[in-house]
Amino acid sequence: DESLTASMAVDHRTHQPYGLLHGGASVVLAETLGSMASYLCIDSSKYYCVGLEVNANHVRGVRSGRVTGVARAVHIGRTTHVWDIRLSDERGKLNCISRLTVAVVPLGENPPGR
């Protein structure tokens, strides 16, 4: 009820050229967690969710193993959700902090800016 958690491998599929976890891969995990968390908070027969803004601070490099992300709600409103997503390595060391803002859109309407 308080959070959503998922993990991702850190290997050749998620590395950048220097052998570290690619920042874009971290953002993909973060946005996936926040988007799915929003989906679980809405009535999907009436609404859908789309990302409005995502940012990330990469605070520590990871070369191998797994990273685990935990999404927690900062704001659950009628038309927007804001999520704090923190990714950590297998030792529990923080490697990325992300914030995702999601629009909650009635079915049949275009998302904001469209």
Image: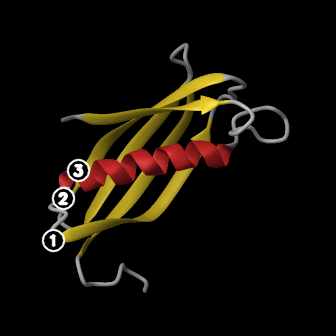
Q: Is 81 left, or right, of 14 in this rendering?
A: left
Contact between marks 3 and 2 (CB within 8 A): the answer is yes
Query: Which image quadrant for residue 82?
Result: bottom left
Residue pointed to by mark 1: 46
Q: What element carries label 2?
A: loop
Q: In this view, does 46 lie to the left or right of 24?
A: left
Q: Name the residue under label 2.
A: 42
Give me the residue at 18% from left, 35% from top.
1
Q: Which amino acid does label 2 sit on?
A: Ile
Measured from the top left, where is residue 85 in percent x and y? 43, 40
Give the residue drawn at x 34%, y 84%: 110
Q: Are marks 2 and 1 in contact (CB under 8 Å)?
A: yes
Residues at marks 3 and 1 touching, judged by CB atoms closer than 8 Å: no
Vertically, is 105 above or below 2? below
* Residue that carries the numbered disc 3 in the rendered image: 40
Q: How far apart are marks 2 and 1 (CA)?
A: 8 Å
Quarter of the image with the C terminus is bottom left
